[in-house]
Amino acid sequence: MITVSRLNTCINLFAALILLLMMIGCAVIYNKRDRGNKAMLQLLSVTFLMMLFSGCSFLADPREHLVIHMTLDALFTLMLYGVMIHFTFYVIRYIQETGKKVNTLVLEIIKTLNNTLFCTAIIVWGLTFFRDEYVVTDANGLQYNEMMQLMAIVFIGLIALLNLVIVFISRKALGNLNLLVFVICLIIPVLPETVLPEYLRPSGRPILVHLAVIMLYIVHYVSRDVRYHRNEAEVSKMKNKMLISVVQPHFIYNVLNSIYYLAGTDSEMTQRAISVFSDYLRQNIDYMNYESAIPFEDELSHLKSYLELMVLRYDKRIKVEFDIQDTDFKIPAMTIQPLVENSIKYGVNEVEGSLIIRITARKEDGINVLTVSDNGPGYHPGSNTDPRSAHKGIANIKERLSILCDGEMTINNRTPHGTDVIIRIK
């Protein structure tokens, strides 16, 4: 009995050590915007505590320290429940991060059912804790709470079944390979302990759960690497499209034409216009070398160069107001300019008097909020009369915000007229 106890103690504590190293790896690259990595770190943490309590429970001889042994065993069971719940959270988060359409209502219902099962298991756990009539001794002389162990098996089985339902309804989003891996990971924890060698059966359940978590960890980082390279390629394509859309031939022609007429009346202003236009083109080309978001101040400087050229062309028909209260954040390059360009293109000839464009930046509840407003005719997506409904630049901006800085963009019409484009960056 002593040999079996010591062996299982060593195996459980060694497994806990492996999990600790994996947790450190997760924490080193931790990013609060990466919710998938956060879910994995939480799963590893709870599994680490489960293996730690499981290993320590074998150290306490039930014949001499029954209370300590049963307490550690109860804590192990509690952590086992926690592992299975976080298993569900991670599966849902992984599916959501694929970016493909899934039935979110069903996912939330199953998540609620899992939480209900967890609460029920905790109540039963509390009612049977230290109840002598449920304490039995196995063939190796180890004592355990039979009711708690039965509840653990039932709970794990039900959670695994619900998780399989989640995976099944999301099979298209996962793909064949990921679907197979997730099914295997969900089946391993419910396998009978008899699949393990006899000397490992006393700690069979935590070992099976531990193996499933390690498989998920490997899948997590392999898929993370694949997504990173895919996103990198997508961002590169989008940057090329954005550069082409920003530096179009007609735009260059209009600016040069304005400078040509200006040269005959104001030489100093002509020099200034040429300098601004040169800086503007250089910044556009420089942006092609950026692999990530840039400081907001750089984007703002680029926007001001663009607006100076637009004012040169439209004179008093455009007025720009700035209310910048927060600059301590990053944003994808060439995000604001296309929005301002849309306001000018579809608003300058539609308003009486001047087109007023207002740009604000502030922080609300820890979220950076950037707003581009105008007093133009408004934005009507899907309308045949609104050319912007087919403008692919809006979708491009939304996608780059999501990939590069976990941001989102919404477009709202104001009453009686005007448009608010709101960007939120966490």
Image (tube, grey):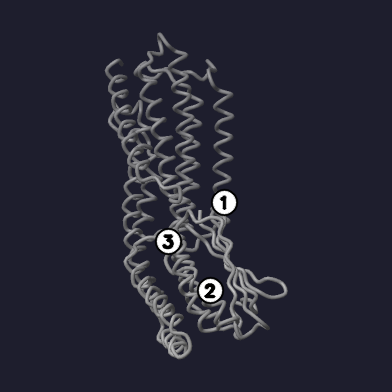
Q: Earlier in the sequence, mark 2 or mark 3?
A: 2
Kindly state the secondary structure of the residue where label 2 is placed: helix
> Residue 414 sits in which quadrant?
bottom right
The residue sitting at 47% across, 51% down in the picture is 93
Looking at the image, residue 229 lies above or below residue 339: above
The residue sitting at 61% across, 69% down in the picture is 373
Q: Nearer the viewer, residue 97 or 3?
A: 97
Q: Position of residue 123 (x, y in %)?
A: 59, 29
Foreground mark, 1 or 2, reads: 2
Disc 3 residue crowd, few under 14, some 14–19, many 20+, Cα 10 Å: some
Which quarter of the figure is the N terminus placed in? top left
Looking at the image, residue 373 lies above or below residue 30: below
The residue that disc 3 covers is: 403
Q: Amino acid at mark 2?
A: Val
Q: Position of residue 229 (x, y in %)?
A: 31, 61
The residue that disc 1 covers is: 108
Q: Amino acid at mark 1?
A: Glu
The residue that disc 2 covers is: 340
Q: Nearer the viewer, residue 379 or 167?
A: 379
Q: Position of residue 70 (x, y in %)?
A: 46, 18
> Residue 189 sits in which quadrant?
top left
Mark 1 to mark 3: distance in Å? 24 Å
Residue 257 seen in this snapshot: yes
Mark 2 to mark 3: distance in Å? 22 Å
Foreground mark, 1 or 3, reads: 3
Q: Amino acid at mark 3?
A: Ile
Q: Position of residue 394 (x, y in %)?
A: 50, 73
Q: Earlier in the sequence, mark 1 or mark 3?
A: 1
Mark 1 to mark 2: distance in Å? 39 Å
